[in-house]
Amino acid sequence: RTYPTAHFGKKMSKCELPNSVSIGSKLDQENQENGPNVARGATFSDVDRGWAFVVLLSSSVCMFVGATLSYGTGVVHVALLEKFKKDAAFTSLIGSIFFSLLSLMGPAVSFVVNRWSCRVGTILGGFLVFTGFTSSFFVTENLTVLLLTYSCIAGSGMGFICLAPIIASGYSFEKYRGMAVGFTVMGAGFGIFGSGPLTQFLLDTYGLNGTFLILGGLGLQCVLAGALMRPSQLELKQKINLQMAKRTKHGIENSRCKMYSDLCRNKTFIMIVICGFLWNAAYAIVSVNLSNYVYSLGTNKQDAAFLWTMVGIGSTVNRLLAGLTLGPNGIDPLLLQFGFLGIVGVLGLTFPFYASVFIGQCLFSLMYGIYSGGLVVLTNPLCLELVGLQQLPLAVGFMYFIAGFGSISGPPITGLIVEALDDYSVAFYLAG
């Protein structure tokens, strides 16, 4: 009986396996040399076909749920300000922790994915989101306890239901990986599309308590979606390679520690990580403050929530288009990254000059959604190009972890500055 391999480019029988000591070092060396072409020449029956499309649809559903929950943070922020009458800096900490844990959980997600599977990580995330939101139903009179239930528990689950599906898509597709990732994160675009109006409707109809309870039920759907993410043969092969490497004489050094050291020595990857830190700080500032800023300018709550529909429309369109451009002979993802970041920065700097007009608010939201949505698509392809498939879960987790510090630090610092200057436009100058 023969087995396809992703590294040797030939079929190998059980009796032909060399000593485990040489396997680990050889695999590690070839993974380092081959990079993103680690699966080239392999023949996996469920990659780019069959159940891969079920995984793709399930991943998109999880991204839809994750975006619906996370991008309603700004609307919930306004409700918390009205209910508790606390200062803007402390109240924004609730939303910023929730939003940032999506990224800060990156290393934990990588560990679970490498130790078990993307399916286990997604199911775990669904249970955490459900537990956090339903617990918040009982403690809405205590803002400090909400830091634990809503921000920490539910926020931790968000990291799993948003990161594990992206990795699952990368493992389920090879030839069409760029388009698959684009389709996966396009689900988040649809979630952004409805997050603002849906959250505002729930707050108006059921209050803060009922909103948390219903959102918890929505998060539970990720358990069902995650159960459908059967590990692909490529994912199982990568896990076998990692286990074989750990059996060598210097297994720990040659696998996990060496992977971390290789990432830290990759200068281009480190620059992209720093870029992600700054970008996520800016994005969190806009996400938390957009609704409250336009509300302070006289826009009613329904119209303020509608702006997130515009963000969702733009984000959905460009997530798909960006994914289509990343196929074979497509545009360099680094070039797209620089272009999108430059345009998003200009949008933030200029928004206060036309923010008093509702048409201007809609235009900003649409354009911001278009170019920020494209940035989300680039995470997986950039990591794949820079570090290779073998280190993909580790690189994605590390990138999101560092980006999470930007998300958690941006809104509170901005809240202090806004409170001192009594001017919300400063938030968008900082974001730009």
Image: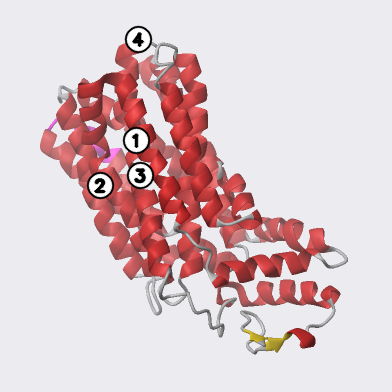
At x 38%, y 18%, the residue is: 88
Q: Distance between the residues labelled 1 and 3?
A: 17 Å
Q: Which mark is residue 312?
A: 2
Residue ID at (27%, 25%) = 292
**Which one is in front, 340 or 284?**
284
> In the rendering, which numbered label is found on residue 85?
4
Q: How crowded is mark 1: few (under 14 residues within 10 Å), some or many (20 or more)?
A: many
Residue behind mark 3:
65
Image coordinates of residue 102 in percent, x first then y, are 48, 41
What's under tag 4, amino acid-wise? Lys
Please name the residue that numbered disc 1 is placed on. 287
SS category of the residue bearing label 2: helix
Element type at mark 1: helix
Dot placed on the residue nearer the N-terminal end, 1 or 4? 4
Position of residue 176 measured from the top left corner of the image (x, y, whole percent): 40, 74
Q: Earlier in the sequence, mark 1 or mark 3?
A: 3
Label 3 Cα neighbours within 10 Å, binned few <14 / some 14-19 / many ≥20: many
- The image quarter containing residue 233 is bottom right
Residue 406 visible within the image: no
- The reply, left or right, for residue 111 in relation to residue 250 is left
Mark 2 or mark 3: name the one nearer the start of the chain.
3
**Extent of the magenta region:** 349-357
Regarding mark 3 in the picture, which secondary structure is present there?
helix
Determine the CA span between mark 2 and mark 3: 13 Å
Marks 4/3: CA–CA distance: 29 Å
